[in-house]
Structure formats: C-alpha cells, structure tokens
Amino acid sequence: MFPTGFVWGAATSAYQIEGAITADGRGRSIWDTFCSQDGRIVGGDTAETAIDHYNRYREDVKLMADLGLTAYRFSVSWPRIQPDGSGAYNAKGLDFYKRLVDELLSYGIDPWLTLYHWDLPQALEDAGGWPARDTSKRFADFAAAVHAELGDRVRNWSTVNEPWCSAFLGYASGEHAPGRREPAAALRAAHHLNLAHGLAVQAMRAQNADSQIGGCVNLYPVTPATGSEADQDAARRIDGLQNRFFLDALLKGSYPEDVLADLSHLSDMEFIQDGDLATIAAPLDMLLINYYSRFTVSGAPGGAASAAAAPTDSGSPWIGSEHVGFVNGGRPVTSMGWEIDDSGLQEMLRRIAEEYPRIPLYISENGAAYDDVIAEDGAVHDPDRVAYIDAHLRTCHTAIESGIPLQGYFAWSLMDNFEWAWGYGKRFGLVYVDYETQARTMKSSALWYADTIRHGGLLGRAQ
C-alpha cells in the first residue's frame, strides 16, 4: 500500500496531443517547422491533427476520471498563448487551458501544469532560439502571464521539461526541433534553459507564494561497460552531461567542474553571467523526475554503436564526449530499444536523497512503448506494459519505505500520441488511439492502473 495522499497521475504534452496547430490564433512553433522538412519525422508524419485533444478534451478528461487519476500533468503551448513568443497574449489560447483546468477540477482531478515541453515559438528561434540569452527572459514573461491567469486554480507548476533534450537533441544532434548541429550553441542553450527555469520561478513566486513549483529533469543511471579507465571516464562524462549538469545547477547552484572542463574546448563559458547560478537555484517545492532506462557506456576506441538508435539521421548529442559508445547491457527492451531496468530508478532516487538537499520528489514520467494492436475481442492487451509499470511502482514503494520523500507517480503517457521524430510509430499510452477515427480504447494497462489507484497500492505482482 502507498501512503495516503500519494499522487496517482498520468502525463501528456501539448504538442503531442492537441493538434489544431492553426486554430484560434495559435502561432507557429519550431516543431511545426521541423515537421514540414523532409526526412525529419519517420513516415513524414506531422502533429497537425495529433489526437485532436484540442477539440476532444472533455472526452479525454472523462477518461481520466474513469481511470481514477488524482492528478493530470499537461503542458501549455507557448505559441498558442503567445504566438510570437513576445508581445500580446492570445485570449483564445489562454481560454482553452482555462476550460481544460475547469473540466479537470469538476472531476476532482488536480491539474499539474508544465510551462514548456519543447514547442518554442518559431519567431524566437528566428531570433536565436535557446542559445540566445533573451529567450530566457521571454520565457519568464510567458510564465508570469500564464501563472497570473491560472494560478488561482492550478497549484502545482513545473517550468522546463527535460532541458537536456531541448538543448542537446535540438541544437547538437539535430534529432529534435529546431534540428541544429552546433555543439557550442547547444551548450549555451543548456545554460539558458536552466536560467529560464530560475527566472520563471522568481516571476511566479512574486505573484503567488503558495504555488508549488518544481523543475523537471530526465535522469539515467550510467554504468561503465567494464572497469577499465576509459570506460570509467566515459561513465563520468555521460553522467555529468545528462544528470549532474542539471541537478547540480538546480539544487546546488553550481555546474560540475569536471563537466565544464570536458567542454572547455567549445566555450570559455562567458555566457554564464554573475548571479545566474543563484537564479537557477531558486528554492523549489519539489523535483520532478522523468525516468525510463539505464545507460551502459564504453570509452574504448571505436566504442559500440548506440543501443537505441535515433529514428532519423542525426549527429551526437554528447558534446565533448562524442567518442563514447553506448553498449547493450543485455536487458529486455521496449519497442524504443530502451533497456528495462527498474533498479536504476531506485539508484537515482537514492542518489538524489543522499547527495542533494532534501526535497519532495515526484516521478513525472515513466512508461514504455510497445507495438499495441486491437485484438479480435476489441481489447488492447499489453501485459508487457503492465509488468513495466508494476515493477517501477514496486521500486517507488521500496524507496518510500526507505525514507526517500517520493510523493507521486505519473505514468507516461495517458494516451498514444505523436512521438516526436518517431511520428505515430511508437505507442506509449495507457489508452489506445485509432489515428484514423480518433476512437479511444482503454488498454489492459489502463484497467490495471485504475485498479491499482482504486486500491491505493499493488495487490499482486503482474505477470
């Protein structure tokens, strides 16, 4: 059994579900531009319709209520609310989120709002994007505007979802929008995403001190393939860029010296101005953690190819450590090619509890993609996903029992949706979506999760 008050949630993001990319004054985002370019998205898919949540949100909230969710984590679309990323705000865009929040509250579902899940207004990218310091200031203005409109009804806020992805997949490897391959720019982007977080926290705190505000990071335990010096150094490097660069900044107000040394050939770090790190480390009410898998790495010459290849042609996101190879650790994998390792979640939770100031923790994303199909009986049977979530929830319970302040879990994702560069070829949802008809069908995992929530814990180990 989980503690009373444990948050049982599911999560989505605006760009992956809303569709309606030109409706009611919405501006263009970097992902709209990216999807329009040949070879960027598997199958040439776009999110023009996605799963039409913009028009079907009431139906989708009813699904959440049927699941028994106590919380729903969603993001707002920056270009829907502020089409050009600065200047006037679009009342119709804000009104959509007001209606969504009101619908959630009518069912007793707590809205958890993420301000940025990768859909930067194209106008800001044209002005330099995240490598430009001004984008951080524009984000703080945007955060303040959304918070002013919704802060009376939304208590839980997070700022930037997975800044590692926005910085290094967007500006180093080019796998994500805006598709640039500029390592030095990616490093500036990483800092400015962190700075945007801190400035947004300050702006929201000034408006309502009662809001619960957190940062959101995607974490991976990193294991060296062998005990060799080269592999040990590879693990240090990847852990530094993936985990410590963001955790240390948010929770300690510093960047790891070894990571800065690894990257010194790219920049003299002049973009880190006096006071930035204090701003980034503004006190938080919680830390949101997205967890999916473990990395096993090698620094040997000609290191192994990545265990989970990118969907389209791209460079390396591992600036300063492009020589590091990612090794298959021999574990079962999801359809993304990601190794399943619930023990890694326990490792990361324990590490945060031991190495950083104590702070309430939430698993804000955790889930798995599988090749789901509708069976002859009309159901979607996904026992592998049930087993995946069951194992990770058991790890969460073990962490809580050991004294780690873990207070909630959000399954990724509520529904099948547009999976970024993979298009519609990967399904993470608890709810199956027929992309032709937009019909929703609860998978076995959804029914199992609903039962788990209803009982407040896990009754028997999933098979």
Image (cartoon, helix red, strand yellow):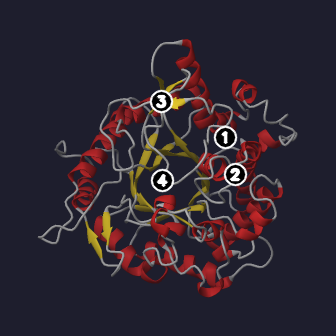
Query: Does residue 60 appear to the left or right of 276 in the view shown?
Result: left
Amino acid type, mark 1: Leu
Decide which of tag 2 and tag 4 comes sooner along the chain: 2
Farthest residue, direction left: 377
Q: Nearer the viewer, mark 2 or mark 4?
A: 4
- The answer to which of marks 3 and 1 sits earlier in the sequence is 1
- Please give the residue where the numbered disc 4 appears in the rendered image: 311
Disc 2 to disc 4, how far (Cα)? 29 Å
Per the rendering, the mark at residue 197 is 2
Check disc 2: other Cα within 10 Å, few if <14, some if 14-19, many if 20+: many
Q: CA distance from mark 3 to mark 1?
A: 32 Å
Sequence-first tag of 4 and 3:
3
**Residue kind at label 4, given as amino acid type:** Pro
Secondary structure, mark 2, is helix
Residue 284 position, x and y percent, is: 64, 46
C-beta proximity under 8 Å, tags 2 and 4: no
Q: Which residue corresponds to the image point at 67% horizontal and 46% vertical from the top-left?
A: 172
Instruction: Describe residue 120's horizontal placement relative to residue 14 as left or right.
Output: right
Q: Which of the two labelled residues, at mark 1 and mark 4, occupies the earlier sequence position?
A: 1
> Mark 3 packing: few (<14 Cα in 10 Å), some, or many (20+)?
some
Looking at the image, tell me whether mark 1 or mark 2 is earlier in sequence order.
Answer: 2
Task: Kindly identify the amino acid type of the residue bearing the numbered disc 2.
Answer: His
Percent x, y for residue 319?
67, 37
**Which residue in the protein does label 1 denote?**
250
Height in image: 259 above or below 176? above
The residue positioned 69% from the left and 37% from the top of the image is: 249
Tags 1 and 2 touching, CB below 8 Å:
yes
Q: Quadrant of residue 70?
A: bottom left
Determine whether the residue tagged by mark 4 lies in a helix, strand or loop.
loop
Mark 3 vs 1: CB contact within 8 A: no
From the viewer's perspective, is residue 156 above or below residue 4? below
Pointer 3 residue: 304
